Amino acid sequence: MLMALIPLGVSATEPVDYVSTLVGTQSKHSLSTGNTYPAIAMPWGMNFWSPQTGKMGDGWAYTYDADKIRGLKQTHQPSPWINDYGQFCILPTTRTVFNEDERASWFSHKAETARPYYYKVYLADYDIVAEVAPTERAAELRFTYPESNESRIVVDAFDGGSYVRIVDDRHIVGYTTKNSGGVPENFRNYFIIESDKPFTFTAVVKDGQIDDAATLAECNHAGAVVGFQTRRGEQVTLRVASSFISHEQALLNLKEVEGKAFDQICRQGRDRWNEILGRIEAKGRDTDQLRTFYSCLYRSVLFPRAFYEVNEKGEVVHYSPTTGEVCQGYYFTDTGFWDTFRSLFPLLNLLYPEMNAKMQEGLVNCYKESGFLPEWASPGHRGCMVGNNSASIVADAYLKGIRGYDIETLWEAVVHGANAVHPTVSSSGRLGYEYYNRLGYVPYNVGINENVARTLEYAYDDWCIYQLGLALGKKAKELKPFKERAMNYQKVFDPETKLMRGRNEDGTFQRPFSPLKWGDAFTEGNAWHYTWSVFHDPDGLIGLMGGKDVFVQMLDSVFNVPPLFDESYYGSVIHEIREMQIMNMGNYAHGNQPIQHMIYLYDWAAQPWKVQYWVREAMDRLYNSQPDGYCGDEDNGQTSAWYVFSAMGFYPVCPGSGQYAIGTPYFPEMTLHLPQGKILTIHASGNLADDRFVARMTFNGETYDRNYLEHADLVQGGIIDYHMQSTPNRERGIRESAAPYSFSKTQK
């Protein structure tokens, strides 16, 4: 029983107990409610484990509506769209079988327990209970068998080139090369499996053929079937570890579970998750809302994953996914900065800065090894999405005081990335930088898709580079191009429609133009979504639109325009469009990232009560703790981090500015345990379900009328008191000085 895994005297409602790892798993290609799988893992762990319901190579490895489990899979998948690498799986059976369709067992969610640190499922076809407990690079698997003369363990190293060897009656080693790109030719995930019960039956599998006379298989698709006799209720434990470096390193990684009982691994995992999730204590409201919150926080600390190991000398080393060599130092991967620069990395900077310091060192190593910072990494550079948002990741960390890494190399990296494009992966660096640097925008008619999206993100990224350069004391001459290009968003603003619009090389705007057309000049969105991507200068955007009244009218229109769309660029209705269409929030598309900050822009237009109204609507209507708990892709923690920040009552609209736009707190009380022992307490008196509006606010006892909070103030700790009510306070936060940061204001 799960309760047996909770130590005596420990509350059964600690933070990790609120987490459901199944949130977002009721997804499919045509409609995402998260596109997640139940990751059994440590925070930022190198290896995750997951039950596998999908076929080998299927990006939808686990879906809630599935009936059968094909294996317990070691996975490194960040997204079904990016798919997996270095995967293999293990399945206990009571017959000698290997084929994934034939071995698959019926299961029920009623006989399934899914926790971050523990997974249990009843495999009905075999009368076996299978359990998993992970560490960062290893795991223990425990199987409770029936009485059988043919109890078996299937090891599947998958296709694409794999190797399995039965070493003796307790040990199996192997490697898998299966991947989806972003790896060198010598890529391998080496694994070792150790059984506490000796094998009395052994066979290897070579491309589907079971051979009980051999102990080694090296072919396209290798595997093994081993087994023994068992009595009813007998438990067999496997200790499993892997390495991207070598079998010898995998053996070192096995020490993470060496000499430890299964329940001990569970307790250690539970303690680790409570340590990380416990950085925020949320109190009040109902259990379902606490489950939603902590499930989102769980998703926020899975990626980017650690891609480093510790060698026999105690040194931190990593297999380089760009050079194929073993290199010194930290490395992290499986994140897309197009998504996660928005609030995931700001959340790390606020709550887990010690982790982001390591991640910044990892970026240094990536640049040294590949010549570019990643924009989408899994595990190496991947061709996905647009923008050059590594600049935001680097700038926000440094400007918020994170140190302990080579910032000068990162400065070199962001400057280089702004003026180059990766020779084989056009997502890294800046595709179209030549046009952008010459014209101030990427033209619509030169064969570079999603050109307005690129222009807007490059302009913000230039602002980030400029701010970082100022902090580093760089000379004005070096910074001048970035300062000037930070205003390039103006070049693609169309005064006729008051929206961002594709612009041709000769300066004319694209024709015809439909604000409802997805893609084309934009990335997974339309003009109503991307027009707001002026993170660093909302006041400048207000000016372009003709003032605050017009700006607010345009913001309101996002919700008022029916969910109409033009999908012709894609040739079919992509899932992001469908997710917008069905949510009954007009053209607001929270299921995708470009618009997720938009609600907070009312703070710049002296109508903060509209932030408060729409944030609460989004939280209540678009999130829950069930398998359909998201309104679109939960991309590497970004959509979850939005919820975590919004629950606290503020959000980082512009990473790099050092400010958070104020929204509306969700819980009556939250306590943030910050570095250096600082504590930030957030009270929200009268915060009932209908009391979403901020009547007044104090910070450390002083009346606080601004629509933003400063990071530098928050990390010192203190007490924020929100006084809530059911009707808007139209007198608070309306002064010009109440508006958060805008770059153009600093230039006046």
Image: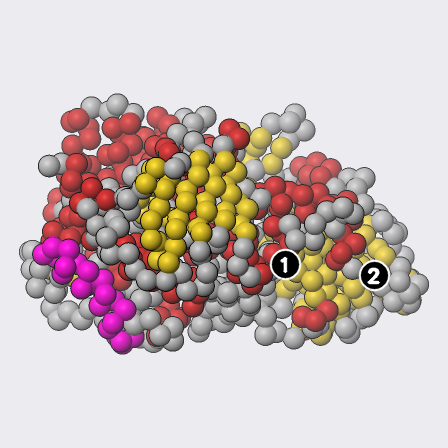
Residue 683 position within the rendered picture, expressed as x and y whole percent measured from the top left? 46, 47
Q: Where 329 falls versus 109 (above or below)?
A: above
**Residue 144 numbered mark, or none:** 2
Asked if residue 553 lies in the magenta stretch, the reply is yes
- Looking at the image, which residue is at 75% across and 69% down? 123
Type of the residue with mark 1: Ser
Asked if residue 177 lies in the magenta stretch, the reply is no
Using residue 685 as the reference point, say whether residue 497 is left or right of it. Answer: left
Residue 600 position within the rendered picture, expressed as x and y whole percent measured from the top left? 30, 54
Q: Residues within 10 Å of mark 2 (few under 14, many from 20)?
A: many
Q: Nearer the viewer, residue 53 or 9?
A: 9
Using residue 87 as the reference point, say whether residue 110 is left or right of it. Answer: right
Q: Nearer the viewer, residue 285 or 392?
A: 285
Any part of residue 112 in sight: yes
Q: Which range of residues does the magenta coloring cover?
A: 545-566
Using residue 360 as the reference point, say whether residue 143 is left or right of it. Answer: right
Q: Mark 1 — residue?
A: 50
Image quadrant in which you'd find residue 231: bottom right
- Looking at the image, which residue is at 70% across and 49% down? 11
Disc 2, SS: strand
Type of the residue with mark 2: Thr
